Structure formats: structure tokens, C-alpha cells
Amino acid sequence: MSREKKKFETKADLLLYFVNGSKRWFVLAVFFACMVSLLDLVNPKIIGYTVDSLIGDTPSRISPYVSVLLAVTGGEEVLRNNLGLVAIAVVCVALLSALCRFLFRLFNSIGAETLVKRMRDTLFDHIIRLPFAWHSANHTGDIIQRCTSDVEQIKMFLSEQLTSLLRVFVLIVMALTSMYNINPQLMMVSGFFIPVIIAYSFWFHKKIGSQFAIVDSEEGKLSSIAQENLTGVRVVRAFGREKYERARFEKQNAYYTNMWIRLMQLMSAFWASGDLISYAQLLCVLIFGSYLAVQGNLSAGSFIEFITYNAMLTWPVRMLGRVIANLSKAGISIERLRYIMNSQEEEDLPDAQKPDFHQDITFDHVTFSYTEDGAKILDDVSFTVKAGTTVGILGSTGSGKSTLMYLLDRMYPIAENSGRILIGDTDIRNVQAEWIRKNVGMVLQEPYLFSRTLSENISIASETGDIEHVRKAAEVAQLSEAVEHFRDGYETYVGERGVTLSGGQKQRTAIAQMLIRKPPVMVFDDSLSAVDAETDAKIRAALNESTKDTTVILIAHRITTLMHADRIIVMDRGRVAEQGTHEELIEKGGIYAKIYDLQMQQSNVGEEDDI
């Protein structure tokens, strides 16, 4: 059954979707961040009041509420004689501010990590449901980079910057209000630079957006090269391509580094310019404030209080600029994740069925190409595989043999008016994809094994994972004898992609992996190519015994693998060139007979050489 799929029209839609599970933590973080801002405004007032009214004789500028609090404590005279009480008040406010700052960081971190977990879980769940064609069109390294670096970038933006944004606004508004109450003229001098910094940040945000996109794209390419070389290290070594691949990696790495240097040059220019504006603001406030103090229009305590507020504004205003500047990078990252999340998942029709696969399989005038304007891989292919029979498929490389099985397993969709594949009388388009793959077992020529034990790899598709079932499947696949020579037997770790096993052992492991779940349709896509002729014969004999009621499709280049099949189909350039039994095809004297004669001659030559 297909799942309900949400479409994200904008980057904000996707961001809100991801944040949904972390909202309460971010709300608490924002609350305590605002409390920190409010408490930070208290101590400058205490210090200004102490300098002017307790140490000096300037009339106090305190609110009526504070006057009532002073009256309770004994009034200004008591505080003048006990300045230690003022110090204690300052320390208490600082401790309370530190507690709120701790809670802000705590809830912010919980929210950020919860967000990252939700993002990774959602992305992984979505990616594994995307069609095989999507994975073929997108580089693995780039997908990994989007799910790691881009996720971390969004996390940093939200947790370190966006959650502080409200705190910044609160601090700016409250600080400017307090500064206005101290001296409106001096506040205007200080406040003049704030819109300048914000406007400059917006301009810079537009300027560096494209550069961030380039850097992210080049990082994905670099990750793809590294991933390809790490997974294909044996091929690189076998062909002595280390120098070439190193040069290829270094070239891409150098280009990526240069892109980062250009980006850092822009960022350095931005931060240096921002610092220059901030220092200019501080200088103007000091000069004009000193002038007012000398003229007697500003008391010493008020000047200290104003300078403290102005210093407190420097970071929030710069922070606001940082948020705007980093909005570009976060926006690019969100857009890259939106591409993944908006990619269409593999879906079933609303009335998708679960037919019995113990029926005939019919390819009815199937035409297929991997791209809309690409060459035809299959051209009007028609044949029937009778239920419970063994059918062999023979053909040269590129004749479309494997494509037939990809279509049967619905790895790729068949376009409308391009034929159909029937299970009995049911079009495969109307069958649930999960049901197809449960009933059609495939063993590929290059099987993929996970970095787990041999037993875990064989039982990966089994519901029970019972060791006895593992052993029986391994025996049919002629793998059990080899396992006996492994030190840890079935608990032997096979390494990444089965690197510790030979090609034949990997193929036999993949065969056992399929046999353990006993699907009604079994496809062997040249999966015996890496085993010798004797082992090939043993495997086919064991399969004949264990798959009597199963439909078996054998794809192979070796005629001895196919000659005992109930029916053999010969593919040539995407078409069915011949079909029939071994004897019938030999009598026709066509492609099959020529390949048979050639392989028999090579076999005889090999035997003579051995003698």
C-alpha cells in the first residue's frame, strides 16, 4: 500500500515539518533566552544607581516599584552604609542569569539533537522507499553529504542562531529603551548604526547565496569520488589506478578548497566590515557621551550604564548580522534536503493486488528504455514462463537479459502503451511492489553482502533467522563445505561488501540468502558465473530437488547452465531471437547453436591443454 506523501512547497514548510517534534524544547529554550536578556539588563541599572545615588549625590532615576523595594530594605541610607548588599544583589542577579543561560543551553541542545534525529530518521525512511531509478540517477556520496553535512548545517543554524533571534530582539528593544531613558540624543547616535549593519547583512546574504550552493555541490562530488574509491578499492588496486584516482581526488579536492577559500574571503570581508562598523559605533558613543558628561548633561553613573548597554548591544547586533548571513547557507541546505523529500516515493495503485505467483508469467509486447529519449533496451518482447518450470535466458552483453528481470521485480516502471507483464491475468502494475519482491527472489551476478556474519547475511530475508534453515539453504547452494573451513563457521564476519569471500562464495551466499525464504519465483541473473563447472552442476542438481514447485528463471552465458531448462529464450539486441528447448534450438542452427558449438570447442580445447 502506498503511504500518504506530504509535498513541501517551500523551504519553510520542510523546516516546520522537521521542527514539529522539537517545538516544546525550542519554546523552553527561547523562554529562558529571553529571561537571560532581561536579567542582563538589571545589573547595569544597579551599577549606575550605585555610582550616582549611593556613592555620589545625583538624584536616582529608579521606578516607583523599585522605590517600594528599597523602602522595604531600609532605603538608600541603609544601602550607602552597606554597599556589600548591592554587591550581593549583583551576584544574585548574575547567578540567576547563569541558571537561565544553563537551562537555555540545555533545552536548546535537547531540541537540536531531537531535531537531528527526526531529520535523519525521516530522510533515511524516505530514501529507502525511493525508486531504484532515482538511486541510479543520484550519486551515493552526494546523498550521504546531504544527509550529514546539510543536516548539521540546519541544526547549527536553528540551535545556535535562530533560537537566539528572539532573545536578540528582546535585548535590542529593552537596551535601546533603557538607553533612551538615559539620554535620547546618545541613543540616536548608537541606534543609527543598527539598521546599517542589518542592511549590509541582507545585501551580503544575497551575494554569497550562490557561492554556498557551489560549495555544497562540490562537496557532494568530492564525497562521491571518495565513496566510489573506498567501495571499489580492489578494482583500483587490481588495475594499478592508484595514481590516477589520487590525481582525480586531488583535483576535485583542490577545486573544492578553492571554492571554500573564495567563500571564506567573502565571509572575512563581511566580518571585517561588520567589526569596523561596530567599532565606529563604539567610538562615536564614547566621543559624544564624553562630551555630554563634560557639559554636565550626563552623570558618571548614567554614562557607565549607557556604555554597558551599548557594549551589550554589540554582540546581539552582530549576531543578527550572522543570522542573516548564515541564512544563505542554511537555505541552500534546506533546499537540498527538500529535493530529496519531494522526490516521489515508489507507489502502488489504490487497488493494488496480491496475486498468487504460482501462475504463468507473461511478457506481452514489452518495450523499454531507461530514459525517455534513450535507446530501446527492449523492443516488443513477448514470451511466457509457465508456472513451475525452469526457463533459461541467453544473450550477449547488452541484449536486455537483466533488464527483463528488473522489470519483473518492478525496479523500473513500464511506460503506458509499452506493453505489460502479467502474473496470471494480473498486470504487474496492479500488484503491490512489496508483494512482488516477497514472491520474486533475485540473485544478481554481483551480489551485495553486508558487513555482518555469514549467518546474518544468509538470514537477512528470513523472518526467523533459524540456524538450521541457514544450514539447509547453504547446503543447497553448495556453500556448507566452504563454511566448514572458516574458523568461526557461520559466525564468520564477511567484511564490507563480502570482501573476505571469493567471488564464487559470495554468489553462493546470495543464492542461500534467497533460498532461505523459498519464494515461488526464483531468478538467477548470471549468478553462477564465478563458480566452476562442477560446482555449477551440483548447485543446479540441488536446486532441481528443492525447487520442484518453483518457477525458476536462469540468466547465463554458459550454455551448460541452461541446456536442461524446460525452455530457453535467446535475446539479441533487445528482441527475442529464438526460443525453444535445447534440442529444438540446436536443430534450428541459429544463434543458440552457434554459441553452443563455440563453447563446446573451447571446452574441448581446455581439456586437451590439461592433458
Image (cartoon, grey):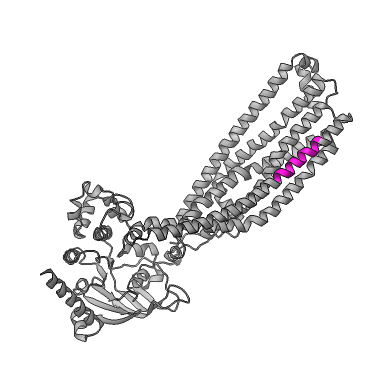
- Whether residue 437 is situated above or below residue 162 in the rendered picture: below
Region in magenta? 274-286
Name the quadrant of the C terminus: bottom left
Can residue 392 be seen in the rendering of this structure? yes
- Whether residue 147 is situated above or below residue 87 in the rendered picture: below
Q: How far across and how far down the image is residue 250, in percent?
A: 47, 56
Viewer-proximal residue, 483 or 236? 236
User: Does residue 480 appear to the left or right of 337 in the view shown?
Assistant: left
Picture quadrant where residue 317 is located: top right
Q: Residue furthest left?
A: 611
Q: Residue furthest bottom?
A: 588
Residue 279 is inside the magenta segment: yes
- Whether residue 414 is situated above or below residue 244 in the rendered picture: below
Viewer-proximal residue, 120 or 374? 374
Q: How many marks?
A: 0
Can residue 140 be seen in the rendering of this structure? no
Q: How far across and how far down the image is residue 542, in percent?
A: 17, 63
User: Does residue 585 appear to the left or right of 572 in the view shown?
Assistant: left
Q: How far across and how far down the image is residue 562, in percent?
A: 22, 73
Name the quadrant of the N terminus: bottom left
User: Does residue 175 appear to the left or right of 564 in the view shown?
Assistant: right
Q: Residue at x 80, y 26 (%)?
A: 301
Picture quadrant where residue 84 is located: top right
Residue 425 is inside the magenta segment: no
Q: Main secondary structure of the magenta part?
A: helix
Viewer-proximal residue, 596 or 465? 596
Q: How far across and how far down the image is residue 369, in percent?
A: 42, 75
